[in-house]
């Protein structure tokens, strides 16, 4: 029943978007096989013990990076609403695991994902939480083509699933206002990442379904930095995001060999 509800919600949202003149989802940077894989799990986005459990555990450290990177843009806003006044785009938002805490910090959030079922789950959960978030089914280049611009863009655990990385980075640049900040998190392409992100996570611990990741698609920090610089970004050194198997949490680290974050500013 829930899957049917999610599909109906997604269909209704798509119909409203069509009436509003929004563009249909693009295929340029989207890896359809990956999207279909995530769509099968959409109804369990907010289950911390489900297939998205690792992403739930990953939220606090990702939000630490996002908050530290974006708060200076908010012109000295203090207290809980440290992102007040900022427009933020969450690309590949899935069920809204990052969109919701960013909204609680005061940002005006737009979430976009090519998985319509995931967007339906995000809309439903935000409604339950009383949070106003503009969720859209589509791809980054859809919003860029529509001329939308944001103070900040977050693309977390997305670029490793993108079919055309240079085109994706070009869309990220187009979506940011001059001086805007981009926050990316992804997985490095190293022997250690193969052991932890694929062998351990998919085959031993079974945190995520087998086939979720393609190690050859993981960008190294140097590769991703070069793409961003070519697109007109100033890029900070990579931050490592390291998992502690004892307490099951992630923390910032100087070791980017598995998970890492990049913060970049549009010149």
Image: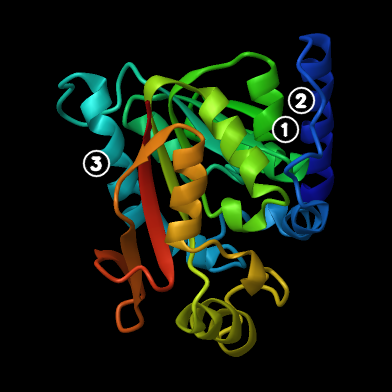
Q: Is residue 125 visible?
A: no
Q: Quadrant of residue 25?
A: top right
- Label at residue 13: 2
Q: Secondary structure at mark 2?
A: helix
- Tell me what residue is drawn at x 21 percent, y 28 percent: 72
The residue carrying mark 3 is 68
What is the distance, in whole Å, between disc 2 and disc 3 at their CAs?
A: 33 Å
- Tell me what residue is drawn at x 38 percent, y 50 percent: 262
Q: Is residue 106 visible?
A: yes
Q: Is residue 171 above or below residue 3?
A: above
The residue carrying mark 1 is 137
Q: Secondary structure at mark 1?
A: strand
175 or 41: nearer the eye? 175
- Tell me what residue is drawn at x 52 percent, y 17 percent: 149
Q: Secondary structure at mark 3?
A: helix
Q: Earlier in the sequence, mark 2 or mark 3?
A: 2
x, y (%) of residue 229?
44, 40
Q: Are marks 2 and 1 in contact (CB under 8 Å)?
A: yes
208 or 75: nearer the eye? 75
Classify the position of the C terminus by image quarter.
Answer: top left
Q: Quadrant of residue 60?
A: bottom left
């Amino acid at each position: 029943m829930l899957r049917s509800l999610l599909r109906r919600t997604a269909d209704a949202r798509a119909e409203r978007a069509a009436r509003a003149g929004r563009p249909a989802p693009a295929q340029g940077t989207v890896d359809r096989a990956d999207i279909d894989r995530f769509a099968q799990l959409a109804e369990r986005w907010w289950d911390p013990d489900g297939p998205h459990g690792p992403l739930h555990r990953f939220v606090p450290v990702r939000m630490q990076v996002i908050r530290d990177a974006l708060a200076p843009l908010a012109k000295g806003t203090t207290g809980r609403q440290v992102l007040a006044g900022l427009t933020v785009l969450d690309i590949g938002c899935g069920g809204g695991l990052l969109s919701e805490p960013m909204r609680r910090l005061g940002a005006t959030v737009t979430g976009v994902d090519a998985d319509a079922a995931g967007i339906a789950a995000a809309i439903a959960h935000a409604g339950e939480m009383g949070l106003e978030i503009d969720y859209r089914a589509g791809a980054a280049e859809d919003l860029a083509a529509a001329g939308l611009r944001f103070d900040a863009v977050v693309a977390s655990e997305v670029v490793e699933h993108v079919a055309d990385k240079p085109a994706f980075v070009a869309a990220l640049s187009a979506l940011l206002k001059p001086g805007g900040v981009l926050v990316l998190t992804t997985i490095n392409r190293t022997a250690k990442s193969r052991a932890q992100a694929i062998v351990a996570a998919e085959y031993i611990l079974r945190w995520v379904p087998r086939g979720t990741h393609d190690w050859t698609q993981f960008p190294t920090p140097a590769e991703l930095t070069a793409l961003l610089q070519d697109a007109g970004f100033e890029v900070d050194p990579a931050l490592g995001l390291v998992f502690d198997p004892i307490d099951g949490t992630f923390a910032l680290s100087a070791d980017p060999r598995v998970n890492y974050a990049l913060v970049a500013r549009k010149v």
